């Protein structure tokens, strides 16, 4: 079996670096054709940005800024020169943030991640990422088809119908959150359904702790993690070496001190900043709010690109629950809809092997329906279900924290 997707993955690191930065000036020229980038990069000579040091002098664009920027200049905040009709698909993620999909093959750069996880041409893949308005399902769908796989566009939920598809098509691969893979396997065992064809998985969008990794192995499934976003697609992915995650080709990844634009010292934990080299929809130093650290040396799998430890938390309070981002702005919106409440705090935990949310809300007195009404608002705003706990006025800490990730 071929070990690498192509020869680019095993290039000398210096050769890769030179190739990336040789392309960057032209990408910057394309970016400046868009009004927002023209303003942000005013006075910058694209031809001079040919090293990491030069790139580090450009301003960082924080993902947390995008909802306000997109609202002010819909749909893309002035960061795309061409109109929405120049793209293949148009999505939205919580925020809202608006994301376009390019027309090229494998627009989200995910085929490499699937290949590293053992997926091959001719495989049948059960894709349980959501296809509804957000790009998650299409990221893996287009990547798997670019690799030559057949895709079952299942989406999450509706396990009974998924059992019928699995038993009929016998997919060897699964893609989706690790939580839903466990739900699917447990439900199949309880119902006496045969899902034994699934032997490998690419999981993302939720925590994949060692206990769940070991459970998947005990059930005969070789599962690999990937780190991606709705803006960039696949950023980094696990390889057979199981030594952190390898950064995808055609991306320049930096790690900066949280809240700044300054690169961290080698090995230090910091915020992920990514520059993409798609001239149609470039991202120039997009700070994702996710923390990681670079790993030293080369991977034993033979891939030579930069490696990161994987996801190590959030630089801000935005967190990911069941594959969906939950943002402080959304908790503020809940407060606006219920002005009778005091402070709010969303606590994110694990219930078994699944993400869970509890919204703690201060109130002096409550009507009989407040808890139910608040749970409905939580679901309406975040698109996720959670429990509600009403607490006394002044009982939540006055520390500015509105999302507490306790996983």
Image: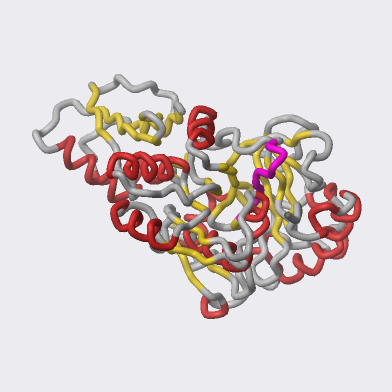
**Residue displayed at 72% across by 60% down:** 41
**Residue 326 visible in the picture:** no
Q: How is the image coloured?
A: secondary structure
Residue 102 placement (x, y as % from top left): 59, 71
Q: Residue at x 47, y 51 (%)?
A: 197
Residue 190 can be seen in this image:
yes
Magenta stretch encompasses residue 269: no
* Figure quadrant of residue 259: top right
What residue is at 53 percent from the left and 56 percent from the top? 230
Quarter of image, res 231? bottom right
Q: Is residue 378 above or below residue 134?
A: above
Q: Residue furthest left?
A: 368
Q: Closest to the observer: 403 or 57?
A: 403
Q: Residue furthest bottom?
A: 85
Q: Nearer the viewer, residue 207 or 279?
A: 207
| Image quarter hosting the N terminus | bottom right
Drawn side of residue 291 relative to residue 165, left or right: right
Horizontally, is 73 left or right of 37 in the view?
left
State the image coordinates of residue 149 (x, y, percent, origin top left). Answer: 57, 65
Tell me where residue 285 appears, x and y as whole percent.
69, 52
Q: Is residue 268 left or right of residue 329?
A: right
Tell me if residue 241 is in the magenta stretch.
yes
Nearer the observer, 372 or 309: 309
Residue closer to the observer: 34 or 389: 389
Q: For the magenta stretch, what is the residue range? A: 234-242
Which residue is drawn at the image coordinates 28% and 46% (left, top)?
379
Q: Position of residue 206 (x, y in %)?
A: 48, 41
């Amino acid at each position: 079996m071929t070990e690498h997707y192509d020869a680019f993955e095993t290039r000398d690191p210096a050769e890769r670096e030179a190739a990336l930065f040789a392309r960057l000036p032209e990408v910057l020229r394309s970016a400046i054709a868009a009004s927002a980038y023209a303003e942000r990069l005013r006075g910058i000579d694209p031809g001079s940005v040919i090293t990491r040091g030069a790139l580090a002098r450009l301003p960082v664009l924080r993902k947390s800024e995008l909802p306000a920027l997109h609202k002010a200049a819909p749909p893309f905040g002035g960061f795309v020169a061409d109109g929405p009709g120049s793209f293949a698909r148009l999505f939205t993620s919580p925020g809202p943030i608006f994301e376009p999909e390019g027309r090229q093959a494998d627009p989200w750069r995910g085929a490499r991640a699937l290949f590293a996880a053992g997926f091959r041409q001719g495989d049948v893949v059960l894709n349980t990422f959501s296809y509804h308005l957000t790009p998650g399902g299409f990221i893996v769908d287009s990547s798997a088809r670019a690799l030559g796989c057949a895709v079952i566009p299942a989406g999450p939920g509706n396990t009974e119908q998924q059992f019928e598809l699995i038993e009929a098509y016998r997919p060897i691969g699964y893609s989706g959150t690790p939580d839903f893979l466990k739900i699917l396997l447990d439900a199949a065992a309880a119902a006496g359904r045969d899902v034994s064809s699934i032997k490998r998985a690419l999981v993302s969008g939720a925590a994949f702790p060692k206990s769940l990794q070991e459970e998947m192995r005990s059930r005969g499934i070789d599962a690999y993690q990937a780190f991606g976003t709705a803006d960039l697609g696949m950023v980094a992915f696990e390889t057979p070496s199981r030594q952190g995650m390898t950064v995808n080709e055609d991306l320049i990844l930096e790690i900066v001190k949280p809240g700044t634009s300054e690169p961290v010292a080698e090995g230090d934990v910091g915020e992920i900043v990514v520059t993409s080299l798609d001239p149609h929809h470039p991202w120039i130093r997009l700070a994702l709010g996710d923390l990681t650290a670079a790993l030293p040396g080369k991977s034993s799998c033979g891939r030579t690109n930069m490696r990161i430890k994987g996801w190590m938390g959030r630089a801000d309070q935005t967190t990911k629950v069941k594959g969906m981002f939950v943002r402080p702005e959304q908790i503020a919106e809940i407060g606006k809809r219920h002005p009778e409440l005091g402070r709010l705090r969303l606590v994110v935990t694990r219930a078994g092997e699944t993400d869970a949310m509890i919204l703690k809300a201060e109130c002096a007195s409550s009507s009989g329906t407040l808890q139910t009404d608040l749970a409905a608002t939580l679901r309406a705003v975040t698109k996720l279900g959670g429990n509600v706990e009403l607490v006394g006025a002044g009982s939540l800490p006055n520390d500015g924290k509105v999302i507490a990730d306790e996983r």
